[in-house]
Image (cartoon, rainbow, N blue to C red):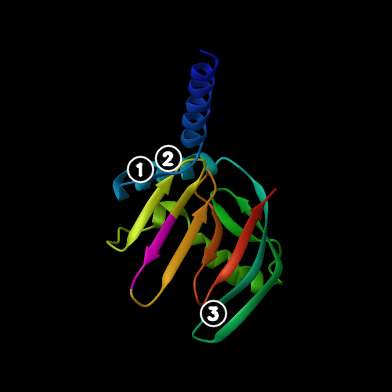
């Protein structure tokens, strides 16, 4: 009887742990939840710090503690004098979870935040967002950066 009780306690713990993690979902469910999350994020204000690197047509760019604001539903530079902040704010404004498009090579996850994993023959790409649909990390062969919020 004691072993049976342990089994049920263990099974219940496993179910609870699974429920707390991210679940694979359809694109439609991902998008629906992301739109709702971003509406909630529009009411929040955060100090934002970006660290890492990204690569575009003009080369590789290092982001060492680029600071921004999330305010009024957008990423904003902390000063008009910081060109790097303008560029990174513009980049992040295009990377919220609600703007992710459907792709047959992408698997979508929701739960405690959002995640999209794209795999092709040539590369893989992982993007994560917090519970508000705001980007927290982007990783592929050209990009590797994290975004934190306070």
Q: Residue at x 34, y 60 (%)?
A: 106
Which residue was labeled with disc 3? Answer: 55
Q: Nearer the viewer, residue 11 or 67?
A: 11
Q: Nearer the viewer, residue 150 or 27?
A: 27
Which residue was labeled with disc 1? Answer: 32
Magenta part of the protein: which range?
Answer: 116-120
Give the left or right position of residue 50, taking residue 30 as reference. right
Confirm whether the magenta stretch covers residue 146: no
Label 2 crowding class (10 Å Cα cut-off): few <14, some 14-19, many 20+? few
Q: Rounded to the nearest whole Å, what is the CA distance between mark 3 and mark 2?
A: 31 Å
Q: Residue at x 49, y 71 (%)?
A: 140
Q: Rounded to the nearest whole Å, what is the CA distance between mark 1 and mark 3?
A: 30 Å
Q: Residue at x 49, y 40 (%)?
A: 21
- Element under label 1? helix
Residue 64 position within the rendered picture, expressed as x and y whole percent measured from the top left: 71, 71
Q: Residue at x 33, y 43 (%)?
A: 29
Q: State the image quarter where residue 116 is shown.
A: bottom left
- Element under label 3? strand
Our reading of the magenta stretch's main secondary structure is strand
Residue 5 position within the rendered picture, expressed as x and y whole percent measured from the top left: 52, 16
User: Is the residue 118 above or below the residue 108 in the image?
Assistant: below
Label located before the other in sequence (3 or 2): 2
Which residue was labeled with disc 2? Answer: 36
Q: Which mark is residue 102?
A: none
Q: Nearer the viewer, residue 15 or 3?
A: 3
């Amino acid at each position: 009887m004691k072993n049976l009780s342990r089994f049920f306690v263990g099974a219940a713990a496993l179910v609870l742990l699974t429920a707390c993690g991210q679940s694979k979902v359809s694109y439609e469910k991902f998008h629906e939840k992301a739109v709702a999350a971003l509406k909630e994020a529009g009411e929040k204000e955060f100090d934002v710090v970006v660290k890492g690197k990204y690569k575009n047509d003009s080369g590789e760019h290092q982001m060492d503690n680029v600071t921004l604001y999330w305010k009024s539903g957008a990423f904003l530079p902390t000063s008009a004098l910081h060109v790097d902040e303008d560029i990174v704010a513009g980049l992040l404004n295009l990377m919220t979870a609600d703007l992710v498009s459907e792709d047959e090579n992408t698997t979508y996850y929701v739960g405690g935040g959002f995640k999209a994993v794209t795999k092709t023959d040539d590369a893989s790409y992982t993007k994560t967002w917090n519970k508000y649909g705001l980007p927290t990390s982007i990783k592929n062969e050209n990009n590797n950066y994290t975004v934190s919020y306070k």
